[in-house]
């Protein structure tokens, strides 16, 4: 646990690696959205183009998930207020009958968009994670980071730190939609201008 925690911190510092057991998803790959019955037609990763996207894998019957969903939306608002405005978040609800029939629970806690998975767990597999994990895509829709449970617990700051880093274009993927790297002093001035001009869409 100690070693793993150190690894997560290291990864956060440079976003140089993904801490994960799931290896089916290559870093910087853009997920190919499946066109099959039961799955929303529009690719949320494409819809979020130009923004950093957080994908939260959850299950509708899970109380912990409801509070995470609520806190995700709070985090989004908090970051918006601090100038981190190119951030989108979605929830993927598990494909089991139990998850399906309890999808209504989220509505009491969040207005984030929820995507329903299939019984074959098409979306959980596509995003390559398990319940309670977060997957992050950069402005170009490239898989840029993976934060597994319990590091995704929003009582900790890992999630916000990953979002901040990706918002600043700090990832190992090449994305021309990211703000250009600049010296620290200059970045804050110019960077916020960019963020503000994109804000009211
Ligand atoms: C969702 O948005 C509506 C309209 O802004 C608001 O009234 C409602 O409280 C929100 N629900 C949650 C769970 O935040």
Image (tube, grey):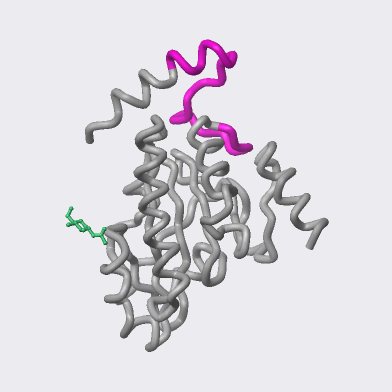
Residue 195: image x %, image y %? 36, 26
Q: Is residue 108 left or right of residue 184?
A: left
Residue 137: image x %, image y %? 49, 47
Task: State the residue at coordinates (78%, 63%).
Answer: 1
Task: State the residue at coordinates (40%, 32%).
Answer: 82
The outermost residue toward the top is 186
Residue 6: image x %, image y %? 78, 50
Depth order, front residue of 81/55 = 81
Residue range in magenta is 170-190
Q: Is residue 108 above or below residue 178?
A: below
Residue 200 placement: quadrant: top left
Q: Magenta stretch mostly in which secondary structure?
A: loop
Q: How many marks?
A: 0
Depth order, front residue of 40/102 = 102
Q: Is residue 184 above or below residue 179?
A: above
Q: Is residue 37 above or below residue 191?
A: below
Task: State the residue at coordinates (42%, 85%).
Answer: 96
Task: State the residue at coordinates (68%, 60%).
Answer: 20
The outermost residue toward the bottom is 97
Residue 145: image x %, image y %? 59, 49
Depth order, front residue of 21/125 = 21
Q: Is residue 10 left or right of residue 119?
A: right
Residue 174 among magenta residues: yes
Q: Is residue 145 left or right of residue 177?
A: right
Q: Is residue 175 left or right of residue 26?
A: left
Residue 149 among magenta residues: no
The outermost residue toward the front is 155
- Which quarter of the rendered image does ligand 1 occupy? bottom left
Which quadrant holds the C terminus? top left
């Amino acid at each position: 646990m100690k070693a793993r925690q150190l690894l997560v911190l290291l990864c956060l510092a440079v976003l140089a690696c993904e801490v994960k057991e799931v290896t089916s998803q290559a870093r910087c790959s853009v997920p190919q959205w499946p066109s099959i019955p039961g799955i929303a037609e529009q690719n949320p990763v494409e819809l979020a183009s130009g923004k950093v996207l957080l994908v939260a894998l959850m299950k509708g019957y899970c109380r912990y998930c409801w509070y995470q969903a609520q806190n995700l939306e709070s985090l989004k608002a908090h970051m918006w207020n601090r100038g981190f405005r190119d951030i989108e978040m979605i929830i993927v609800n598990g494909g089991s009958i139990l998850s399906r029939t309890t999808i209504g629970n989220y509505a009491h806690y969040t207005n984030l968009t929820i995507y329903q998975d299939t019984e074959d767990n098409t979306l959980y597999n596509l995003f390559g994670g398990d319940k309670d994990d977060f997957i992050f895509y950069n402005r170009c829709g490239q898989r840029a980071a993976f934060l597994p449970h319990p590091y995704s617990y929003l009582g900790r700051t890992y999630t916000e730190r990953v979002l901040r880093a990706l918002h600043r274009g700090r990832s190992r993927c090449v994305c021309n939609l990211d703000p250009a790297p600049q010296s620290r002093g200059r970045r804050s001035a110019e960077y916020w201008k960019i963020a503000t001009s994109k804000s009211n869409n």
